[in-house]
Every structure is written in C-alpha cells, then in structure tokens.
Image (cartoon, rainbow, N blue to C red):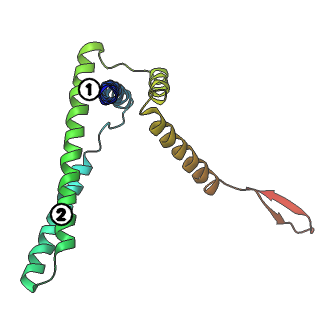
C-alpha cells in the first residue's frame, strides 16, 4: 500500500513539473513570437489554415466522386479526419500563442532582444523533462544546416589558360 502511494505521489510530482515546464515553454514561445513580430517575421503561418482547409475540401470532392463510382473510400475518409485533427490542433496552438502574445504585449510592450531569445532557449534546453527533446531538435537543425551549407556553397575551380597553366576561378 505504501509503495503504491509513493508511486502515485511521484506521478503527481512529475505531472506538476510537466505542467510547469509546459507553461514556461508557452511563455517562451510568446516571447519568441514577439521577437519575430518585431523583426518583420510572421509568428504564425496563416497559410497553414488555408492549405489544410483546401485539402479537406479536395478530399470532400474525391469522396463524393468515389461514392458516385462505388469506390472504397477508407483511405480518403481517414485522411480527411487526420486533416481535420491537424486543423483543430493548429487552431488551438495559434489561439494559445496569440493569447500569450497579447498578454506579453500588455506586460512589456513586446520588446524582445536576440540575447533574450538565446537565454530563453538555453533555459528551455535545461528543462528536466522537455529539455532533451529541444536539444535533439536543435542538433537535427544544426546538422541539416551544415549539410545544406556544404551542398550549396560555391567552390573554387581551376581552369586551364592559353599558356598551359592554371587559372583560379570562382
């Protein structure tokens, strides 16, 4: 009985820690959104909602045509439900971010420096439960950036000149 109570107490403690980390990440996201907003970058891609809505309409058309032809529509119906879930999830995330953005604007006018964004990221990566996820995401981004940089970088090429020597060209 005591062992079960200890496990439940541990789970309660972990749940509280996770809720605190989630609240911190939401606040940090709002601060980052301020930084983006103040530097002329959209914090939320409004095109996502339009795109998902368009895809849902496309699936409606495909489903209607499939019903007319008597085609199996399980895949399309599943895809439509998945798109609806994505749209709901995106809308909820956008609502939370915009609420936090408005709240932060009222509190400090929205001025956020690049140094503060960096500090917030360091704090997020130090979180006991969620920090490792953000560290992995950062490493994946850095690795992808290195590959992209090396793939699309100009290289020096030596070409032959009229005298049989080599010229250095860009």
Q: In x, y percent, where is residue 27?
A: 32, 24
Query: What residue lies at 30% left-to-right and 14% top-to-bottom?
Result: 108
Circle nearer the N terminus (2, 1): 2
Q: In x, y percent, where is residue 153?
A: 64, 53
Image quarter (top left, top right, bottom left or bottom right) of the N terminus? top left
**For the residue carrying disc 1, how many other residues have a C-alpha within 10 Å: few (<14), some (14-19), or many (20+)?**
many
Is 47 drawn above or below residue 30 in the view shown?
below
**Mark 2 vs mark 1, CA separation in Å:** 31 Å
Q: Nearer the viewer, mark 2 or mark 1?
A: 2
Task: Give the residue at mark 1.
Answer: 101
Count how many numbered circles sit on residues in the image.
Answer: 2
146 displayed left or right of 13: right
Q: Nearer the viewer, residue 157 or 165?
A: 157
Residue that protrudes farthest toward the front in the picture: 1
Look at the numbered discs 2 and 1 and tell me whether their residues touch, using CB distance below 8 Å.
Answer: no
Is 64 drawn above or below residue 126 in the view shown?
below
Task: Give the residue at mark 2.
Answer: 80
Query: What residue lies at 36% left-to-right and 36% top-to-bottom?
Result: 41
Q: In x, y percent, where is residue 48?
A: 26, 50
In the image, which disc is placed on residue 110? none
Name the secondary structure under disc 2.
helix
Q: Nearer the viewer, residue 74 or 26?
A: 74
């Amino acid at each position: 009985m005591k062992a079960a109570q200890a496990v439940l107490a541990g789970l309660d403690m972990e749940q509280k820690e996770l809720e605190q980390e989630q609240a911190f990440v939401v606040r940090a996201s709002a601060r980052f959104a301020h930084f983006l907003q103040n530097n002329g970058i959209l914090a939320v891609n409004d095109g996502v909602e339009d795109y998902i809505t368009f895809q849902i309409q496309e699936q409606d058309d495909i489903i209607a045509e499939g019903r007319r032809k008597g085609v199996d529509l399980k895949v399309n119906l599943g895809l439509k439900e998945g798109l609806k879930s994505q749209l709901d999830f995106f809308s909820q995330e956008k609502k939370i971010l915009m609420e936090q953005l408005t709240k932060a604007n009222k509190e400090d006018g929205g001025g956020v420096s690049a140094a503060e964004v960096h500090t917030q990221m360091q704090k997020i990566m130090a979180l006991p439960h969620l920090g490792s996820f953000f560290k992995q995401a950062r490493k994946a981004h850095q690795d992808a950036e290195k590959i992209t940089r090396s793939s699309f970088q100009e290289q020096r090429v030596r070409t032959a000149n009229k005298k049989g020597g080599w010229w250095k060209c860009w």
